[in-house]
Image (spheres, helix red, strand yellow):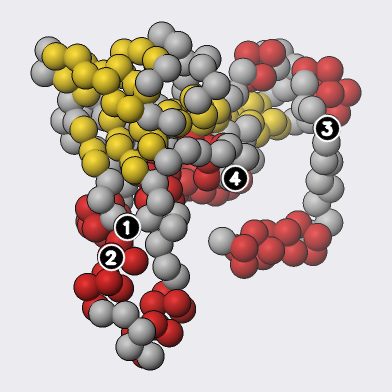
Amino acid sequence: MVAASMDLINNLHALEIPVLLAKEADAEFVRAMAPDVVVIATGGKPLIPNIQGIQDKKVVLAWDVLSGKARVGRKVVIVGGNAVGLDTALYLANQGTISPEVLHFLAANKAETWETLESLISKGNKDVTVVEMLQKYGKDIGLTTRWTILGELKRLGVKILTGAKAIEVRAEGLQIEKGGKQDLLEADTIVIAAGTEPLGGIKNELGGLVPEIYAIGDANEPRKALDAIREGFLTGLKI
């Protein structure tokens, strides 16, 4: 990922394409630029579900967890069994397990039994539960990687509840409904991974200002990264 980013940056420099940072592209800015074409690639933002008590301080966003902005307690409930939710579960469940380098050292020196080593690589310091409304989780993960992610989640002891709806954030954790019955999942932290909504509102402000306007990627409709790359490429050919 880093190499790909550097390649794009180097190409921008080579082609002498100006990049303006810390600048909001609002309607007035676009009017002053007077461009022939505007491509909106502003991405999306986390979708916040309508759950009672969701403003509680124990509720954080998956994006903030993965970026290191949010601190997470020992007992974690993740709302959303999509790719982001499962990636977050995998990230948290791995915390506290030993690294491959430490495993190799302990195994090579026969410092622990194999049973102990298996425990050290499979049990971290987080108790993670995923709550998914649908009967199937990880539907938006590619077939070639889905089985590996699900296998890792099982190995790390992540619990996944399907057909379960988040009802209310309470002091003790998350109230859910499953099969017509309600239950309380104890949680120190509740992570929201309920999907993404487009962040392309500027398109509505540019009507009549620009001859051609294109919204691509999540700014148009939340999907996979490959879809955004394809749309960007096709849009580039079009203009």
* Percent coordinates x, y for residue 72 in the rendering: 50, 38
Residue type beneath disc 4: Gly
**Mark 2 sits on what residue?**
119
Q: Amino acid at mark 1?
A: Lys
Image coordinates of residue 85 in percent, x first then y, are 38, 38
**Extreme-top residue of the structure:** 52
x 38%, y 55%: residue? 124
- Picture layout, residue 130 above or below residue 95: above
Amino acid, disc 3: Lys
Judged from the image, the secondary structure of the residue bearing numbered disc 2 is helix
Q: Earlier in the sequence, mark 1 or mark 4?
A: 4
In this figure, which residue is indicated by the disc labeled 4? 68
Q: CA distance from mark 1 to mark 3?
A: 45 Å
202, 172: nearer the viewer: 172
Q: Which residue is mark 3?
A: 23
The disc label shown at residue 123, or none: 1
Kindly indicate whether the residue at mark 2 contacts the one at mark 1 (C-beta within 8 angstroms).
yes
- Figure quadrant of the N terminus: bottom right
Sequence order check, earlier mark of 3 and 2: 3
